[in-house]
Each structure stands twice: as structure tokens, then as C-alpha cells.
Amino acid sequence: DDEFGHMLVEILKQNGVNAEGCLFDQHARTALAFVTLKSNGEREFMFYRNPSADMLLTEAELNLDLIHRTRIFHYGSISLITEPCRSAHVSAMRAAKSAGILCSYDPNVRLPLWPSAQAARDGIMSIWKEADFIKVSDEEVAFLTQGDAHDEKNVLSLWFDGLQLLVVTDGEKGCRYFTKDFKGSLPGYSVNTVDTTGASDAFVGSLLLNVAKDDSIFYNEAKLREVLQFSNACGAICTTKKGAIPALPTTATALELISKGTN
């Protein structure tokens, strides 16, 4: 319940996001993340929390009615680092799963927030097999498997029965996809990269938007490739401006980039 918290909720509302699930904590500050940009647009993060409001979410505060109204329940792994938020995360995820809601997982590894690299691996993998859809970056594959991300054997070690789709993003090179029936890859788009912050979120958000409209894409490779092409374009466009939310593309700008091709 501070200036940053109210600003963030206001930004969500300005961007057409339903914010009825947001809560304000009277006793803790909103977490801050400082992003440092390198010359190639890649970034480094520095976080201020301990404890921040997001770490203090409890099971009792969960809006289960809101969860039950969703088509997709999407989550990362940062909420697994400390209690009580970890228990709230697991409870919300299980509530969604038991209601037949699609569970989507983007681990979003942020090592500075975990006690150690092994704690991060263990925490991330502790809920791995609850998901219906998982998106990981090539760097995250390397971190989780401690092997070469481009060796398909290592990627497939992350597969499990019950998973519907595993997507590996390879930065500007595009993405790879794996289902129980088919697998493949799609090239990325060549753009003038300024800031990679938010590119992964643009990719996943646009993908989930299309899954929410038609989840048969998990079983139809032609449809899946079309949707992933759109997501590749959205991720690429997001790197062409500074910031995360201000750089998010519209459907029109993504389709325009697709029409130009991948080179």
C-alpha cells in the first residue's frame, strides 16, 4: 500500500487488465527491480525486497472465485522462494488444476533472489509436473539440466507424461516446440534490438491469448506454428523499445512484421 503499488495497479488498469485480484499490504513495501542495460540490449537485474508485499501473500487471501473464472492460470517461480507466498502459490495452482483450468508455467529464473543455484533448481522443479504448458529459454534449459540447451536430449529430459506443450525460446533465433505427437522449430525476426526486457512476456502473453481462444493448437501443428510465428514477432517487437509494458506490440504491428518475413 505505497506509491509504487498504487502506480502499478493503475498501469494495469490503463492497459485494460482486470485488477480485481490485486491486494494492498499495509505493512510491507512494493518490491523494486532495477534493470541495467548492456550495449547489446541484454539486461541485468537488481532487486530490493526482504520482505516485499508480494512475498507475504497468504492462502487465506486467495480469490478462488477469480481463479475458477479463468481459462488459463499462468505463473512463474519467484513466488516459490519464501513462505507464506509459496503455500499460496501451490494452493492457487492446485485449485486451478482441480477445476480443469489450463496451468501455464514460465519459470523465469532470477538467481539473485534464490538462496543458491541448487535451491533455485529444486524450487523450480518442485512444481514442474503440475503444468500443462511450459515455456523455458535456452539459458534456462542449460541451467535446469546443467547441459547443452541445443542438445535435444537435454530438452527432452524436461518432458513428462501429461505435459501438452513445451516451448524453448532461443532469443533472436526463434523457438523450438515439443508435444507428444510432433516437434519443430520456427525462426525469429531480425530487428534493431534496444532492450530485451519484456520480450519473453510478450512471447508468452501472445501465445496464451491464442491458446485461450483455441486450445486445439496443442494438437494441430499447422495452427501451433502459425501462433508461434505470431509470438516470435511479438517478442521481437518488444525488444525495439525501452521498457517492458510500453514496448508491448499490438496485433497489427505483429502482423506487419510477419508480412515482412524473418530476415
Image (spheres, rainbow, N blue to C red):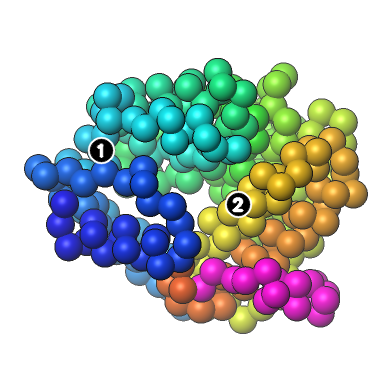
Which dot marks residue 128?
Answer: none
Compared across the picture, whether 196 is left or right of 252 comes to: left
Amino acid residing under circle 2: Val
For the residues labelled 2 and 1, the Cα–Cα distance comes to 23 Å
Residue 170 lies, with reference to residue 72, above or below; the image says below
Amino acid residing under circle 1: Met
130 or 119: which is nearer to us?
130
Callout 2: few (<14), some (14-19), or many (20+) C-alpha neighbours within 10 Å? Answer: many
The quadrant in which residue 119 appears is top left
Is residue 104 in view?
no
Q: Could you tell which of marks 2 and 1 lies nearer the N-terminus?
A: 1
Is residue 140 in view?
yes
Residue depicted at x 82% and y 28%? 180
Dividing the image into 4 quarters, which one contains the C terminus? bottom right
The quadrant in which residue 54 appears is top left
Q: Position of residue 65 (x, y in %)?
A: 43, 30
Q: How many marks?
A: 2
Residue depicted at x 56% and y 22%? 99
15 or 185: which is nearer to us?
15
Residue depicted at x 61% and y 81%? 192
Q: Secondary structure at mark 1?
A: helix
Compared across the picture, whether 11 is left or right of 162 comes to: left
The quadrant in which residue 34 appears is bottom left
43 or 154: which is nearer to us?
43
Residue depicted at x 34% and y 30%? 62
Q: Position of residue 43 (x, y in %)?
A: 43, 65
- Disc 1 marks which residue? 55
Residue 147 lies, with reference to residue 45, above or below; the image says above
Q: Position of residue 147 (x, y in %)?
A: 62, 37
Give the residues in magenta: 247-263
